[in-house]
Amino acid sequence: MLMLKQADALVDADAEALVDAEADALVDAEADALVDADADALVDADAEALVDAEALVDAEADALVHAEADALVDAEADALVDAEADALVDAEADALVLAEADALVDAEVSMLRPMR
């Protein structure tokens, strides 16, 4: 009977060890699944963040290109206005010189005419 009790105790110990091993294996499997799920979620989040970052970089690059294009257009418009203003000043100066020359010629001609 003693041997039977010892055998039962041994079987119980073996059964407990088996249950413990199965529980440990189950915990390990669940932990692995959780780690895999967390890793997948992290990879997905990183991929989404990368896509968002690329979209932001693209948007900033587009904004920079537009700003540079606007600045170039403004500079060209300013240069055109300056050129037109210079041309107008030159034309007015030429007209003034011609008017003064005409007035001078008229004055000299009237001085040269015999007085009546």
Image (tube, rainbow, N blue to C red):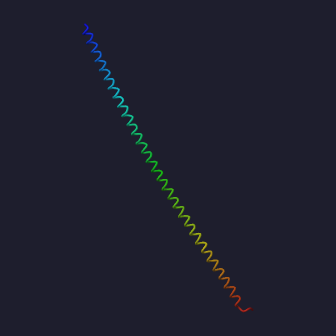
In the depicted structure, whether residue 39 falls above or below residue 23:
below
Q: Indicate the quadrant where residue 93 lies.
A: bottom right
Q: How many numbered circles does the render carry? A: 0
Q: Residue at x 31, y 18 (%)?
A: 16
Q: Position of residue 110 (x, y in %)?
A: 70, 88
Q: Residue at x 26, y 8 (%)?
A: 2
In the depicted structure, whether residue 68 falls above or below residue 100:
above
Q: Residue furthest right?
A: 116
Q: Residue at x 49, y 54 (%)?
A: 64
Q: Position of residue 37 (x, y in %)?
A: 37, 34
In the depicted structure, whether residue 72 falls above or below residue 116:
above
Q: Indicate the quadrant where residue 1 lies.
A: top left
Q: Nearer the viewer, residue 4 or 56?
A: 4
Q: Position of residue 68 (x, y in %)?
A: 50, 58
Q: Position of residue 62 (x, y in %)?
A: 47, 53
Q: Residue at x 42, y 42 (%)?
A: 48
Q: Nearer the viewer, residue 104 or 13?
A: 13
In which quadrant will I find the C terminus? Answer: bottom right
In the depicted structure, whether residue 108 falls above or below residue 20:
below
